[in-house]
Amino acid sequence: MPVYRDEGVVLRTTPLAEADRIITVLTRRTGRIRAVAKGVRRTSSRFGARLEPGTYVDLQLYEGRSLDTVTQADILSPYGAVIASDYPRHTAAAVMLETAERLTSEERQPAMRLFLLLVGGLRTLAQGERAPSLVLDAFLLRALTIAGYGMALADCAHCGDPGPHHAFSVPAGGVVCPECRPHGAVSMSPAAVKLLSDLLTGDWDRAGISEARTRREAGGCIAAYLQWHLEYGLRTLPHLERV
């Protein structure tokens, strides 16, 4: 069977038999893959904690018919282990990992931009210099844009009328003007719309001085928008702790 090597971020692990695990990994070149890590649940395993969620690893694998097999794993950055000590960062990382898996609908479809975004997001969380909620929301906005679900934040999502607009409609795709405002649209504060824009463009100085209530308002809109496009809820989102 062909052998290949790739680096990736472990998204999820699932027990298999008595001592094995199936790991789901978003890789740099191959895309999302699933592979068996044999004996990894034994205390004597040579892989040990190298294949835990959130770990950035360099892998060597055998390609199989349905599942590949991990033959070598080396840690490049133990983001998951560093983040796990802080609950807000841990829950933010869990949402990021699940979102990355859900936004890659097919296995072995290259997703380089999403991979780089995920690595950058985990690195920022591990450094602990920015609020976890802001890091998560910036990741979600950009990941949705990469997946083709970009949120309209300046011009009306329906007619393109230049903003600023302060009504937000999830089905419409973002902010809408008064003439296009559909039933069910919600009013957003100008500060929340600006925060969404700052997070999308990477203006961390402005985002960092936003008020807690503004962050909650923006985060709620992002969560609703994400789950609308994923069509059903994330398992990890109810556990998210926003400070």
Image (tube, grey):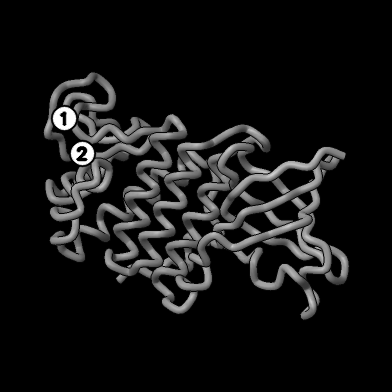
Q: Which of disc 2 and disc 1 is earlier in sequence?
A: 2
* Residue under the point 26% across and 52% down: 218
Residue 37 location, quadrant: bottom right
The answer to whether residue 145 is left or right of residue 34 is: left
Badge 2 amino acid: Ala
The answer to whether residue 78 is left or right of residue 161 is: right
For image coordinates 39% across by 51% down, the residue present is 223
The residue under the point 80% across, 51% down is 69
Q: Position of residue 102 (x, y in %)?
A: 57, 45
Identify residue for label 2: 167
* Residue 148 occupies quadrant: top left
Disc 1/disc 2 C-alpha distance (Å): 8 Å
CB of mark 1 within 8 Å of CB of mark 2? Answer: yes
Quarter of the image with the N terminus is top right
> In the image, which disc is placed on residue 188?
none
Q: How many marks?
A: 2
Label 2 neighbour load within 10 Å: few <14, some 14-19, many 20+: many
Task: Residue 131 in the image: state x and y as whole percent.
Answer: 28, 65
Q: Is residue 118 above or below residue 39?
A: above
Residue that mark 1 sits on: 178
